[in-house]
Amino acid sequence: MVTNLPPQCAGLEKKYREATALRDKIAALEEYMAAIPKHKGTEKLLQQLKTRHAKLRAQQDSERSKKAAGGGFSRFSVKKEGAAQLVILGPTGVGKSVFLSALTRASPEVSDRPFTTVEPVPGMMTFEDVQIQLVEAPALCQGASSGAGWGLRVLSLAQNCDGLILIVDLASEPAAQLNMMLEELRGAHIEVIEGTGKLEIQDKENGGI
């Protein structure tokens, strides 16, 4: 264990390691991760725990999918509305839900807990007289194109949309996050072509962007 962790972390780590049922193990791991303060000294530990969490959620998701689809692969699907459908992709905890809330009237759950979003969340954004559909996807993690986490289901959203919005956390190796997403997209045979249009973001006086 990393030194200088809060006293309760030792007990939470033990609770996670001793959990036997998959559901209990995931819940215990999330509780343990939430108790660890975020700073330079805990980055490596948190990344390791996020990887373990993604694998456990992938196992849980696979079991649920098999039960729901009789053993087949089920895709995430959101009916397209408006002039275009843009899917918001990013690792866990980078602010995808906050971004969606700021641009649409959607009300996704916003939490510091990793992997809060478990289903696609759509919202409509109005630009001048054009309606554009934004869809927040569950977190994309390393190994997604091989089935980790919700990987294949998230990538199925990316395959069928009109465009992608990739979000990273600028405080935590943003280049590595972006490269991971591009690698997983390429693994699913999705080639990202950078747009040529100009994007400008401004704060509104009454809140939002």
Image (tube, rainbow, N blue to C red):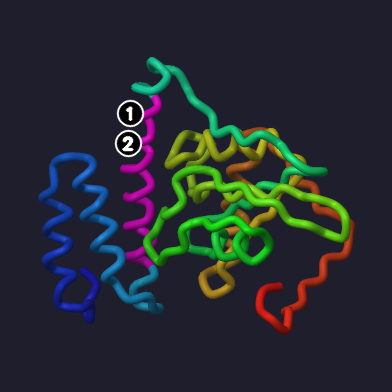
Magenta-highlighted residues: 44-65
Q: Which residue is mark 1?
A: 63
Residue 46 within the segment the image draws in magenta: yes
Left of 57 or right of it: where is 168?
right
- Say which residue appears at 69% left-offset and 54% top-offset: 165
For badge 1, the amino acid type reads Glu
Q: Secondary structure at mark 2?
A: helix
Which label belongs to residue 207?
A: none
Predominant SS of the magenta segment: helix
Query: Which quadrant of the figure has residue 48?
Result: bottom left
- Whole-percent x, y for residue 89 in the image: 60, 51
Which label belongs to residue 60?
A: 2
Q: Secondary structure at mark 1?
A: helix
- Say which residue appears at 33% left-offset and 28% top-offset: 63
Give the alpha-carbon distance from disc 2 to disc 1, as whole Å: 5 Å
For badge 2, the amino acid type reads Gln
> Which quadrant is home to the C terminus?
bottom right
